[in-house]
Amino acid sequence: MKRIAFILVLLFAFSAQLLAQSISGKVVGAEDGLPIPGVTVSVKGFMNVGTLTDMDGKYQINLPADATTLVFSFVGMTSQEVVIGGRSVIDVTLKTEDIGLEEVVVLGYTTKGKNEITGSTVQISAAQLEDVPVVSVDQALQGKVAGLSISASSGTPGSTQDIRIRGVGSITAGNAPLFVVDGVPVDNSNYSGDAASLSSLSALAAFNSNDIASITVLKDASATSAYGARGSNGVIVITTKKGAKGKKTAFTLSTDYGFQNAAIAGQKQLTGAQRKELFLDGVFNSYGATYGFTRAEAEDFTYANGLDYGD
C-alpha cells in the first residue's frame, strides 16, 4: 500500500512539473534600453494563458506542457514572437513601430491622425505627384480629388488656375481656396504684372511637382476650424520635401518638352511689302481724284499729309 502511494506521489509531481513550467525575463526598449511596464506576454495558441510586465519590465509566466512560442506585444511597438526552446529565462527588446505617412494628415499648423479629424480631407502623396508633366502643382490635383474642379484662365503655361472645391460658395466674394505652403498662406493671384493682358502667371508655377512631399485638400469643417473665414472655400495645404539626417546628397535631372499646332491652317498672312502696297492703293483710291495725284505719287502724298501716323 505504501509503495502504491509513493508511486502516485511521484506521478503527481512529474505531471505538475509538466503543466507548470515557469519562464521569467525582462522587456526593454531598443532605443533607450529602459524597462517597459505593461507589456502583454502571451503563449501562442493559448488564449487564456498570459501576463503583464511590472514597473521594472519583469515578468513571470507558467506555461502549458506543449507551449512553444511566447508573444510580446505593446501599443506603439512591433510585436515579437520568441521560441521558448527549453529556456527558463527570456529577455526581449522591443522596437518602436513606424507609422506611415498615409495615417497622418497635415493641417498646415499641425498634424493629426485620420481618426482625429471630423471633416472631409484628401491627401495626395509624393508618389502620385512625381513625374507628372504639369507646369503648376495645382494642375496635378485634376482628377485626383472628388469635388474639386480646375479650369485654366488662359492658355499660357503656368497661368493661374480657377479652382473650385465643392462648387461656388459666394456670388460677390471670391471662391478660390486658400493655399498654405509649409505653414505659410500664399496668395495665388495673377503675378504677371500686366492687368490688361489676357494671360496670367500663378505663384505655384515656381514649385516643382517632384519637390512636393504631400498635398492635403481640406474641404469643409476641417478647413474653417484651422483657418477661420479664410478657409471658407477650402484649403489646399502643400508640404515640400526636406533634407533628412543620414541621407546622402543626390541630384536628379528631368526634362520635358512640348509643341503646339494651330487647330486650322487659316488665311496666309501678308508680308510687310504687300501690306504697304495695299495701303498705298487705298490712299490713291480715297484721295487721288480729289487732290489730283497719280498712283506713283501716293507714297509722297501719304508722308506729306501725315497719313503714315509718323511711322
Image (tube, helix red, strand yellow):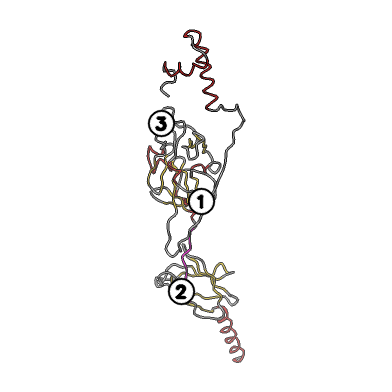
Tell me the amino acid under the disc marked 1.
Ser
**Mark 2 neighbour class, 10 Å CA radius: few under 14, some 14 to 19, many 20 or more:** many
Tell me the amino acid under the disc marked 3.
Ala
Residue identifier under label 2: 59
User: Residue 82, image x and y in percent?
Assistant: 54, 73
- Spatial separation of the CA atoms under disc 2 and disc 3: 75 Å
Tell which residue pokes out farthest to the top in this image.
290
- Spatial separation of the CA atoms under disc 2 and disc 1: 43 Å
Main SS of the magenta part reads loop
Residue identifier under label 1: 125
- Of residues 172 and 130, the one drawn nearer to the viewer in this rendering: 130
Task: Please tell me in which quadrant of the rendered image residue 186 appears.
Answer: top left
Query: On the rendered image, what quadrant is the N terminus found in?
Result: bottom right
Q: Earlier in the sequence, mark 1 or mark 3?
A: 1
Q: Secondary structure at mark 3?
A: loop
| CB atoms of marks 1 and 3 within 8 Å | no
User: Residue 301, image x and y in percent?
Assistant: 45, 16
Total marks shown come to: 3
- Spatial separation of the CA atoms under disc 1 and disc 3: 35 Å
User: Residue 176, image x and y in percent?
Assistant: 44, 36
Residue identifier under label 3: 195
Tell me the amino acid under the disc marked 2.
Tyr
Q: Which residues are magenta?
A: 91-99
> Magenta segment: does it hold 94?
yes
- Of residues 211 and 306, the one drawn nearer to the viewer in this rendering: 306
Q: Is residue 210 above or below residue 159?
A: below
